[in-house]
Image (cartoon, rainbow, N blue to C red):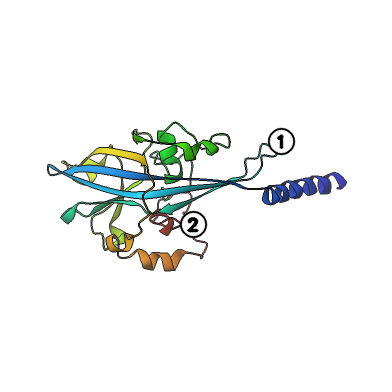
Amino acid sequence: MRWAIGGLLLILLAVFAVKAAPTDKYSYRYRLQISMEVDGKVLTGSSVIEVKWACGQLIPGAGLAPCESSLGGQATVVDLGPRGVVVATLFTGENVLPVPDGAVDAVWLCANAFGNRSTYEEIPKLPGLAGRRVLAPDNFPRLVWFSNPADPNSARKVTVGNIASILDPSARITEATVEITRDPIVVDIAKKLPWYPAMLEAQKGKGITSKPGKFQLMYRMFVGDNS
């Protein structure tokens, strides 16, 4: 019993040390741009996303990397006119790893494209990123097609590989890029997805999370909490 209590005390002290330790902060912004071809027309959408990291001191021997990430900005929307919209969300909408179709959250997306895995050792290098990168098929955001942008129930997951079979035979992703930027963050998602404010009000602060292994729409998929 004495050892159990002692072990618990050490854990609590470690947690306290992480919370009490000086915090280093790192951030960077990138523009995600996605272009699609449908019916012979190329349509493009983009948005600025900000990634912030706060890291405490690494606890020697404990293997703890006390870093927390947060996002600002909004999802990227490609307006397809009468065919609806395709949205590249900030989060995958699933609470299971690995994500079944390999979709990647926005916090990792740009860093991955630059070869930075956002590990404890690599996070301090993120503010120094510069330039533009094309996204590889295995490093792609969650794509959601809304055949009716005014109705969240019209949402369907799509991928680079199956978008033609689900949306339209002529549909394809022509290019997807991330580019480091200092452009301001713009949040106007409610103009593109009019149901978003109601979802935000219904979900934020209510402890609602994605069910394991099940895709569902969450307000955090569309606008970052730091926006």
Residue 199 appears left or right of 161: right
- Tag 1: residue type? Pro
Question: Which of the pair 31/158 is nearer the observer?
Answer: 31
Does 49 sit left or right of 144 as displayed? right
Quarter of the image for residue 107 reads top left
- Which residue of the protein is positioned furthest toward the top in this rendering? 115
Q: Would residue 88 be visible to someone looking at this image?
A: no
* Residue 5, placed above or below residue 65: below
Seen in the picture, residue 59 relative to 46 is either above or below; the reply is above
Residue drawn at 75 percent across, 50 percent down: 12
**Which element carries disc 1, helix, strand or loop?**
loop
User: Is 206 positioned to the left or the right of 157 in the image?
Assistant: right
Q: Amino acid at mark 2?
A: Thr
Q: Residues within 10 Å of mark 2 (few under 14, many from 20)?
A: few
Q: Nearer the viewer, mark 1 or mark 2?
A: 1
144 and 129: which is toward the camera: 129
Tell me residue 33's x, y (percent): 30, 44
What residue appears at the point 51 percent right and 36 percent down from the top-left corner?
125
Q: Is residue 56 left or right of residue 139?
A: right
Residue 160: numbered disc: none
Q: Earlier in the sequence, mark 1 or mark 2?
A: 1
Q: Residue at x 49, y 57 (%)?
A: 209
Residue marked by disc 2: 209
Residue 69 screen position, x and y as percent: 52, 48
- Secondary element under disc 2, as helix, strand or loop, is loop
Q: Which residue is mark 1?
A: 60
Pinpoint residue 83: horizontal percent, then vertical percent. 18, 53
Are the residues flagged by discs 1 and 2 in contact, CB closer than 8 Å?
Answer: no
3D distance between C-alphas at marks 1 and 2: 33 Å
- Quadrant where the C terminus sits is bottom left
